[in-house]
Image: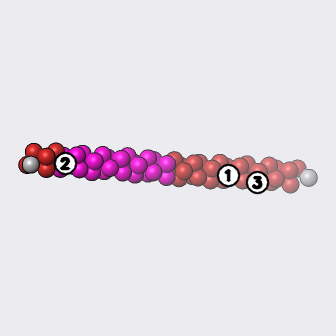
């Protein structure tokens, strides 16, 4: 009887452990995706700012030539 209870407990412990590991992996993946989205957003903002500065310089150049 005691052996069977121990087996059941071990099965439950194993299942809980597997769930926790799966949850941690899911959280890790979620954080990684969020970091990737943030980096992409920052990169796009930098590119947009560079393009705006370049366009402003071209407009200024054309304005002065006229």
Measure how far apart labels 2 and 3 are at the Cα level: 72 Å
- Residue drawn where x is 36% and y is 51% of the image: 23
Lower position in the chain sequence, tag 2 or tag 3 = 2
> Viewed as shown, does residue 4 lie left or right of 25?
left
Residue nearest the viewer, comparing 6 with 51? 6
Whole-number angstrom distance, CA of label 2 to CA of label 1:
60 Å
Kindly tell me whether residue 46 is visible in this rendering.
no
Q: Is residue 47 magenta?
A: no
Mark 2 vs 1, N-terminal side: 2
Q: Is residue 66 left or right of residue 39?
A: right
Residue on which the image places disc 2: 8
Can residue 37 be seen here? The reply is yes
- The residue depicted at 77 percent of the width and 51 percent of the height is 55
| SS for callout 1 | helix
In-front residue for pair 38/19:
19
**Range of residues picked out in magenta:** 8-35
Q: What is the crowding at mark 3: few (fewer than 14 residues within 10 Å), some, or many (at least 20)?
A: few
Q: Which residue is mark 3?
A: 56
49 with respect to 27 (left or right)? right
Point out the residue furthest to the right here: 66
Q: Nearer the viewer, mark 1 or mark 3?
A: 1
Q: 17 or 8: nearer the eye? A: 8
Q: Is residue 16 left or right of residue 52?
A: left
Residue visible at 27% across and 51% down in the picture: 16
| Mark 1 and mark 3 residues within 8 Å of each other at the beta carbon | no
- Viewer-side label of 2, 3: 2
Which secondary structure lies at badge 2?
helix
Q: Main secondary structure of the magenta part?
A: helix
Q: Residues within 10 Å of mark 1 (few under 14, many from 20)?
A: few
Look at the image and say whether residue 33 sits in the magenta stretch: yes
Element at label 3: helix
């Amino acid at each position: 009887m005691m052996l069977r209870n121990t087996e059941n407990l071990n099965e439950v412990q194993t299942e809980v452990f597997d769930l926790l590991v799966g949850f941690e992996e899911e959280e890790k993946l979620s954080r990684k995706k969020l970091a990737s989205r943030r980096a992409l957003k920052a990169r796009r903002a930098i590119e947009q700012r560079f393009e705006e500065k370049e366009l402003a310089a071209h407009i200024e150049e054309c304005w002065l030539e006229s």
